């Protein structure tokens, strides 16, 4: 029976039957849709779900592809933004350096007008002679450059110290905030006299002592303190620092306080040596 069935339904006969069926449906469709409508309905039940499934899969694949492209685009944009940010940081650092240099030049220009009558030599800090930069340091200018003992040393911000040792090609500068250092000074606003004293116990805090202030002095926190005319080694009018915390001593006979130095002793790189000494200025 099986052999007969397979012999009768050969592929050729099946193909002919399908072709005949299609021809009949095509011919019938010219005259009426009633016959083909059930077939269409049955076909829709099979094909439409498959088509919807294929469309859904296609949409998912398209969405995933779009998301992948979007992520890749965002990553590329992020790299560009990171590169731009680094470039802006570099430009900002360059501008900051230019601004600092401009500020230094302005300070030097302002000081130049104040010290126009003095001769000066620029010097670079090349080392320290102690375990603390705030005590003393060496500069790359010596006797062959005209440097002598007792010459005042400043930065664009204010007084640094005084030359205490001189050699052929370098010199030693002792800072005004070194332990046991004394500078005769005065309040620029009130003209009250005082002494600026270096104190090793205060050195790490970045301040120095103010002493020998009269009880009737009107000095206040924030006032500028400059070197006084009565100083034996320091030229007059050099900015020393700013008053901080003036109080009356326990004896009630004088006042004392602290001073914040104008110069930045923790970041000394370049200084100016005033080659006119106080002795030369006094003796004319």
Image: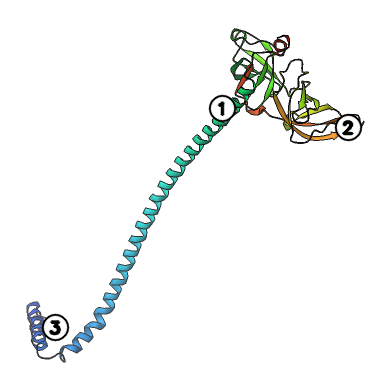
Q: Secondary structure at mark 2?
A: loop
* Mark closest to the chain's N terminus, 1 or 3: 3
Q: Residue 272 in the image: x percent, y percent?
A: 62, 19
* Mark closest to the chain's N terminus, 3 or 2: 3
Residue assigned mark 1: 105
Q: Dividing the image into 4 quarters, which one contains the N terminus?
A: bottom left
Q: CA distance from mark 1 to mark 3?
A: 110 Å
Q: CA distance from mark 3 to mark 2?
A: 128 Å
Residue assigned mark 3: 2
Describe the colour scheme in one phrase.
Answer: rainbow
Q: Are marks 1 and 3 in contact (CB under 8 Å)?
A: no
Q: How many C-alpha atoms fall within 10 Å of the one at disc 3: few (<14), some, or many (≥20)?
A: few
Looking at the image, the residue that sits furthest to the right is: 251
Residue assigned mark 2: 249
- Left or right of 7? Residue 263 is right
Q: Disc 3 or disc 2, which is closer to the eye?
A: 2
Q: Are marks 3 and 2 in contact (CB under 8 Å)?
A: no
Q: Secondary structure at mark 3?
A: helix
- Left or right of 181? Residue 37 is left
Q: CA distance from mark 1 to mark 2?
A: 41 Å
């Amino acid at each position: 029976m099986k052999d007969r069935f397979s012999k009768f339904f050969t592929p050729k006969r099946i193909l002919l039957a399908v072709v005949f069926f299609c021809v009949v449906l095509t011919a019938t469709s010219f005259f009426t849709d009633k016959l083909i409508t059930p077939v269409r309905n049955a076909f829709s039940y099979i094909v439409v779900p498959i088509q919807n499934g294929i469309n859904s899969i296609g949409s998912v694949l398209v969405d995933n592809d779009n998301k992948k492209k979007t992520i890749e685009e965002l990553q590329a944009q992020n790299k560009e933004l990171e590169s731009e940010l680094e470039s802006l940081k570099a430009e900002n650092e360059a501008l900051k350096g230019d601004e600092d240099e401009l500020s230094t030049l302005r300070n030097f220009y302002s000081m130049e007008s104040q010290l126009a009558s003095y001769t000066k030599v620029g010097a670079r800090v090349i080392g320290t002679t102690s375990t603390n930069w705030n005590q003393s340091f060496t500069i790359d200018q010596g006797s062959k450059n005209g440097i002598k003992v007792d010459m005042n040393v400043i930065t664009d911000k204010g007084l640094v110290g005084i030359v205490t040792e001189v050699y052929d090609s370098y010199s030693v500068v002792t800072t005004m905030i070194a332990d046991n250092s004394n500078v005769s000074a005065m309040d620029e606003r009130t003209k009250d006299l005082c002494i600026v004293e270096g104190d090793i116990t205060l050195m790490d805090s970045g301040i120095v002592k103010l002493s020998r202030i009269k009880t009737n002095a009107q000095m206040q926190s924030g006032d500028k303190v400059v070197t006084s005319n009565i100083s034996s080694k320091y030229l007059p009018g050099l900015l020393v620092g700013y008053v901080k915390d003036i109080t009356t001593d326990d004896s009630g006979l004088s006042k004392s306080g602290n001073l914040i130095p104008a110069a930045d002793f923790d970041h000394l790189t370049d200084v100016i040596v005033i080659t006119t000494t106080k002795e030369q200025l006094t003796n004319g």
